[in-house]
Image (cartoon, helix red, strand yellow):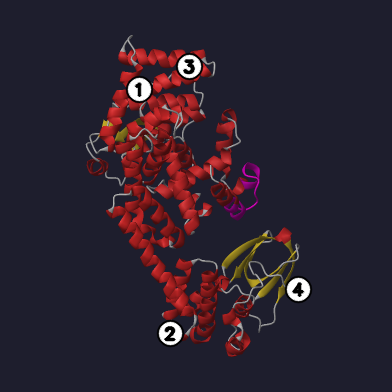
Amino acid sequence: MLHALVNCSHRMGSTLLHLFITTLVVLMAFTDSGYLLADEVQLKNGHVMRGKILSDDGHQIVLQVPEGKIWIRRSRISSVLRLDPRKTLIDECVRRLERGTPGSAIGFLRREYQHSPHQREVLPLYRKSLLGEVESLLDRGLLERALGLWNEYCSLPGSHPQDIPLRSRVLAGESLLCQLESTIHNSLESDQPAEAIGHIDALLDRFPSEGWKWEETLIDSKLELGRRLYLSGDLARAAPLLIEVVVEQPPLLNRTRSAIVHCAAQQHGLSFDAAFELLPDDPTLHLAAAEAAALHGSGFDQSRHLHRVQELVGAQIHPLLLEQQLIQDASDELAGGLPLVVPLERRLAAVSERLWRDWDLPASPPASLDLDQHEDLETMQDSLGLPCGPAILISEKQYGRVISETLHLVPDFPFIDQDQLPREMFRLWLPRILGQPRDLPPWLEEGLCVRSRGTLALQRDQLLLARANSLGTLPEISRLITMKVSIEDELFRAACGSLVDMIIEDVPHILLPEFLDQLATDGLEQSLSIVTGTDTLHELQQRWIRSIDSGP
């Protein structure tokens, strides 16, 4: 039988030539210990996977392999073979080393070395796998990962790094890191933010985990470069930089709001609709939207925007003066001056109008809401006795029936009109949108509310999810759908929103109430194939990860 192992190549490094001599004693030690007996799973596509079957429910099996766990649908399996007791997962790790892919076994060997009673037997193979992977990573130019595994090798008993030829290559990688850091400092000292950004990007490309050291410096450099480009009139290059710094650090919206809106008015960066989320009553933006509407033959929209400008500034409209005022506001904000304040009543009205428009709701939004404004977040949390954010909808119930709802908020909190305010206002209007009382599981309600937020908040969600996916910290769907209450966590909220977005993306608004009612009644896991077209939560998780990888 041929064994075409998954995730294995046939490359063999120079450090692996005498593998069997050095590992024979290890394997003999394991054959007498009854250590993690293995199974072979023959797939219908001809591949063979060796590991330990942890569970088999008739629909899928969970196979432990050196890299971790793999879920395999039964329909894809040709046969399962129980191996001879002498064939263990350690034997499989040796095969990985022999075939030139030792890195796939390191996680398993690390855990066994740290937690199993077979520490002494695992150690030689653990060391050799580390060295083999270090060589492979250096060959591929992945210096940071190589340095990390080299340090891990040096920390193990019996290691002799000074006698290993790889040492000079590792030291060269450490020297490169120092050189890159030096060039960054030189750029900062000479007040060249563009060069500093380029050098930081080059360093992070080689050494990603160094990002925490340079995060603030990178944001500051991008903000300064965006400011200079904006003041020079290069709005096309300024817009993406200013948007990026807000997505990375939302409080910086107070420094960039007017500049981002001005860029949008010149058709750079955000769309008109997204810019109106930031400054719903800016006359320059309304004039730009009216001009665009005229070009597209939309007389109604053109008239609407021009009428709004007249309401704001009167019958005499001077476009150049209005734009100059916006530029002055943007310059003051970028220099650290007081941010332009949009009255709370106008922000509430703008959010309500957008939600009504997005969901095709009849009539008009209510003219007033029950509000309780707080001076700052700490005062609000003390008053409510809750670890909440700067906006939260508090419902009072009697015998299961809602008798009052109050929106508590800190009006001047940065980014609130992009994030917490539209989220909690959507929660307030959710029964009207669904046409029934709000009674959804936390993950589903939170996901719907998250989707209602502003453009910049949704872009931040994409950033958080992509970052979590690359770090392997993306929440499991099984954990999301078993939440008992909503939680104050950016990543979990972003995950709920992304999951709900994927599930309902093809559902028309008119069918959404019935669809959500089925999800709430039956549960996601019980209605998977109907609502998602997948058979298991694991398949749905993989589909979700692929959607995150593909981006918006």
Q: Is the magenta stretch mostly helix, strand or loop?
A: helix
Q: Tell me where residue 31 appears, x and y as whole percent.
A: 62, 87
Q: Does the magenta stretch include residue 519?
A: no
Tag 3 or tag 2, which sits nearer the N-term? 2
The residue to which callout 2 is attached is 162
Image position of 74 with respect to 136: above or below: above
Q: Give the range drawn in magenta.
A: 528-542
- Return the residue nearer the eye: 386 or 41: 41
Hey, what amino acid is under mark 1?
A: Asp
Q: Which residue lies furthest to the right in this view?
A: 1
Residue 2: give its label: 4
Hey, what amino acid is under mark 3?
A: Asp
Q: Can residue 305 be seen in this view?
A: yes
Left or right of residue 438, residue 506 in this image: right
Residue depicted at 51% across the width and 49% down the height:
481
The residue to which callout 1 is attached is 281
Hey, what amino acid is under mark 2?
A: Gln
Q: Is residue 443 visible?
A: no
Q: Which residue lies furthest to the top in this view?
A: 315
Residue 364: give its label: none
Disc 1 residue crowd, few under 14, some 14–19, many 20+, Cα 10 Å: some
Hey, what amino acid is under mark 4?
A: Leu
Tag 4 or tag 2, which sits nearer the N-term? 4
User: Could you tell me which secondary element the residue under label 3 belongs to?
Assistant: helix
The residue to which callout 3 is attached is 301
